[in-house]
Image: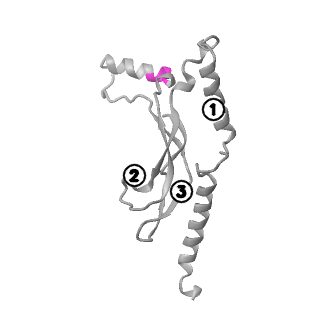
Amino acid sequence: MPEDYPDQFDEVVDFIQATIKRLRRSPDKQTPIFSRRERNRQNAATNTENSNKKGRRNQKGKNRGCVLTEIHLNVTDLDLGYETKEELIFRYCSGSCDAAETTYDKILKNLTRKKKLVTDKVRQACCRPTAFDDDLSFLDDNLVYHILKKHSAKRCGCV
């Protein structure tokens, strides 16, 4: 009987591996495991809240701009047409990129304002994903296997 379904076997193995990965990073664990970067980010946030503003004059809002934020959702909440009870942690980029404005950006803005450029659609840097999480594999309510690529941010930056 396994000879009848060789191509589905690979999909099932992929699904099981993706599910195991997701369970490993599940928020339901009693002791959360954070990467070094996440621990440093949490420590910095704690230290910033506990410290006075002395000694922070030259930072120019480095940590207040574009940041990675996460929310726990059902796949159905993404409104992509999937009906399922599968859940995920959706990470997205939010914040301002004003601190990332370069001399080039200032020049473009000035030339646009003075009507030296033909187009006035000079875009400001915006907070966007620079890397994405692993693909998300799940079964919908009709037991159809789906894979979502580039669905959740892994890192953010001003682009």
In three-dimensional space, the C-alpha distance between marks 1 and 2, rounded to whole angstroms, equals 28 Å
Helix, strand or loop under label 1: helix
Helix, strand or loop under label 3: loop
Q: Is residue 36 above or below residue 79?
A: above
Say which residue label 1 marks: 42
Rendering quarter of residue 144: bottom left
- Identity, as a three-letter code, of the amino acid under mark 3: Asp
In reply to whether residue 95 is colored magenta, the answer given is no
Left or right, 27 with respect to 40, comes to: left
Circles 1, 2 touching at the beta carbon (< 8 Å): no
Helix, strand or loop under label 2: helix
x and y, in percent, of residue 117 in the image: 33, 24
The residue at 55%/50% (across/down) is 133
| Label 3 vs 1, first from the N-terminus | 1
| Label 3 vs 2, first from the N-terminus | 2
Say which residue label 3 marks: 135
In reply to whether residue 103 is colored magenta, the answer given is yes
Magenta-drawn stretch, dominant element (helix, strand or loop): helix
| Label 1 vs 2, first from the N-terminus | 1
**Label disc, if present, on residue 77 of the rendered structure:** 2
x and y, in percent, of residue 105 in the image: 45, 23
